[in-house]
Amino acid sequence: MLAQTSIKIKVRNLFFSYAETAVLKDLTVDILDRSITAVVGPSGRGKSTLLSIFNRLWEDIPGARMKGSVHIHLDGTDRDIYHPACSLPDLRRKVGLVFQIPNPLPMSIYKNVAFPRKLAGGSSKQQVMDAVETALKQAFLWEDVKDRLREDARSLSGGQQQRLCMARALVVNPEVLLLDEPTSSLDAEATEIIEQLILSLKENCTIVMVSHDMAQVKRVAERWLELSEGKMMANGRISAPACRAR
Ligand code: ADP
């Protein structure tokens, strides 16, 4: 019997606008657990906005408004992430976001990755060190940096910086990882490493990735959804990405 695929993110009748600009208009969509879903569509259609809605990053933008509901299944429970009882720091730990341009903090490689773990509290120094090592290994970066953990993170190459940002998101064991065009500033070689990394994370994470590169979407994603005119224009399954067969 085939395993039942569960829904990780449930969006219902979502309307979103920035001051004068209506961006999403009655969007309803389900995102499956432990899948890699690509959000595609022309520029300015609300792809990045949709990611920011999944971890409430837009809330401080003056004039921005949202209507509708977003539920995410976290810690084994269905959570209305806009319910007043939903803890924002907890949500941001469970739903990590990696931006288009790598944004290391002006501190050492080690401190960059340790930072969210320390902020979460409840871990001993040794536990933080172990978590940093695990996250750097998950992000395919450990071998590159294990002997230079005290160096400034900004001394890393662009591709390494993006993997560092992935490690920083992974160190708190997120259930959902949001990736906003994570390779658009990288060269082909660095892009390939990040794509392999994304594929390796799927076992433990639900990944939602904005990409404008359809070849990449076919290599990495299993599902896609296209935004247009503020709604879901189409969605579907991608069969056997070539990259996974390697
Ligand atoms: P996409 O990711 O599809 O390119 P975005 O979600 O970035 O689209 O943007 C959707 C629309 O919202 C665009 O018209 C953009 O100019 C506008 N927008 C995005 N961010 C802001 C903001 N912080 N304030 C005002 N308008 C914004």
Image (cartoon, helix red, strand yellow):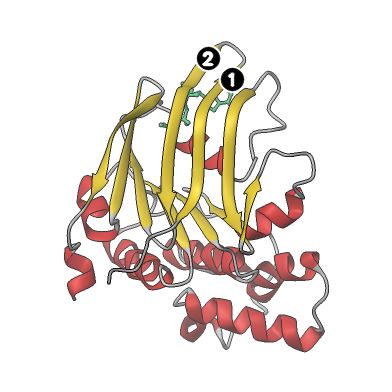
**Is the residue marked 1 within 8 Å of ligand 1, measured from its CB?**
yes
Is there any visible trace of residue 105 in the rendered image? no
Characterize the local packing of mark 1: few (<14), some (14-19) or many (20 or more) Cα atoms within 10 angstroms: some
Task: For the C terminus, give its image quadrant.
Answer: bottom left
Q: Amino acid at mark 2?
A: Thr
In the rendered structure, the answer to whether residue 34 lies left or right of residue 129 reads left
Image height check: is 238 above or below 171?
above
Image height check: is 29 above or below 245?
above
Q: Amino acid at mark 1?
A: Tyr
Front residue of 83 and 98: 83
Mark 1 and 2 residues: CB-CB less than 8 Å, in contact? yes
Task: For the N terminus, give its image quadrant.
Answer: bottom left
Residue 235 falls in which quadrant of the image? top left
Helix, strand or loop at mark 2 = strand
Image height check: is 56 above or below 112?
above
Q: Residue at x 18, y 73 (%)?
A: 245
Distance, label 1 to label 2, CA atoms, is: 5 Å
In the rendered structure, the answer to whether residue 187 lies left or right of residue 31 reads left
In the rendered structure, the answer to whether residue 186 lies left or right of residue 110 reads left
Is there any visible trace of residue 94 in the rendered image? yes
Q: Residue at x 70, y 84 (%)?
A: 129
Front residue of 183 and 144: 183
Q: Which mark is residue 98?
A: none
> Residue 111: x and y, percent?
71, 71
Q: Which mark is residue 18?
A: 1
Residue 82 falls in which quadrant of the image? top right
**Is the residue marked 2 within 8 Å of ligand 1, measured from its CB?**
yes
Image height check: is 204 above or below 72?
below
Front residue of 2 and 119: 2
> Residue 242: x and y, percent?
16, 65
Q: Which mark is residue 21?
A: 2
